[in-house]
Image (cartoon, rainbow, N blue to C red):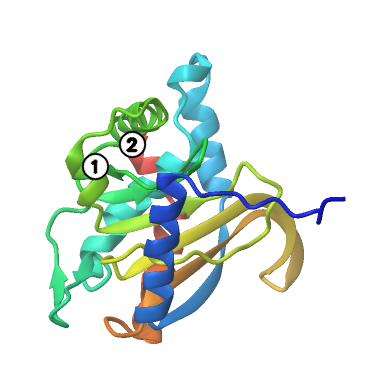
Amino acid sequence: MTSGREPVTPTRMRAAIARRMAQSKQQAPHFYVTAEIEMDAVLDAAARLNEGRPREERVSVTAFLVRALAEVLPKHPHFNAVWREDGILERIEAVNVGVAVAVEDGLIAPAVLDCAGRSLDQIGASLRELVERTRAGRLRAAEISEATFTLSNLGTYDISSFTAIISPPQVAILATARTEPRPVVRDGEIVVRQMMTATLSADHRAVDGAAAAGLLADLKEVLASPGSWT
């Protein structure tokens, strides 16, 4: 007769994830700020941009989010930063947005390097290549170690919202869920818009709630008018 229990030894990747996430939650005092972001303009821009393109060349919503962060983070440099072991916040000039990618035995968040100033098409192509090389185990060292901020997008899943754990030594991570039609009030009337819930997890040692709210407000504004990117 068995006990009905099966011990599973974690893979090296799973063990590494366990150590880093435990370290983050134990050492970084997380707080969370959530915003509802209207995505109609992004979806319209994506449809126009991808019309006639083969599937493997289409620009994803994730690419739009990375492009928006590349524009917003230089205005909020305390979020594009790392918290050093000596207790100093080190702001970083380059915007290297890590993007969480699911692999067979865990999760990796390699960085799209030097995002600021790059076009949407350039970011889209870099992101497609990055995901492909992540799943093939062919990442470069800088892509693994030099992310300055991370995006975790579960928009392809039936998930309305979630929170993410900061990847140390970074000080923030943005969790975005699916875009779905929801009733909202505009000019005193109830209308249906394509809405996405975005939750920013931030390290309270480095930043405060008002600053986090400001970053999300600017992100909402940028995503409301992506037409100039395409």
- Say which mark, if any, is on residue 59: none
Residue 214 horizontal side relative to residue 139, left or right:
right
Q: Quadrant of residue 215?
A: bottom left
Quickly name the residue at label 1.
143
Decide which of 161, 30 is in the foreground and name it: 30
Decide which of 163, 17 is in the foreground and name it: 17
Sooner in the amino-acid sequence: mark 1 or mark 2:
2
Residue 98, percent from left and from top? 33, 50
Residue 175 horizontal side relative to residue 131, left or right:
right
Label pair 1/2, CB-CB below 8 angstroms: no
Residue 200 horizontal side relative to residue 44, left or right:
left
Tell which tag, 1 or 2, sits nearer the viewer. 1
Quickly name the residue at label 2.
120
Decide which of 218, 210 is in the foreground and name it: 210
Question: Which quadrant would the C terminus be assigned to in this image?
Answer: top left
Q: Identity of the amino acid at label 1?
A: Glu
Q: Identity of the amino acid at label 2?
A: Leu
In three-dimensional space, the C-alpha distance between marks 1 and 2, rounded to whole angstroms, equals: 19 Å
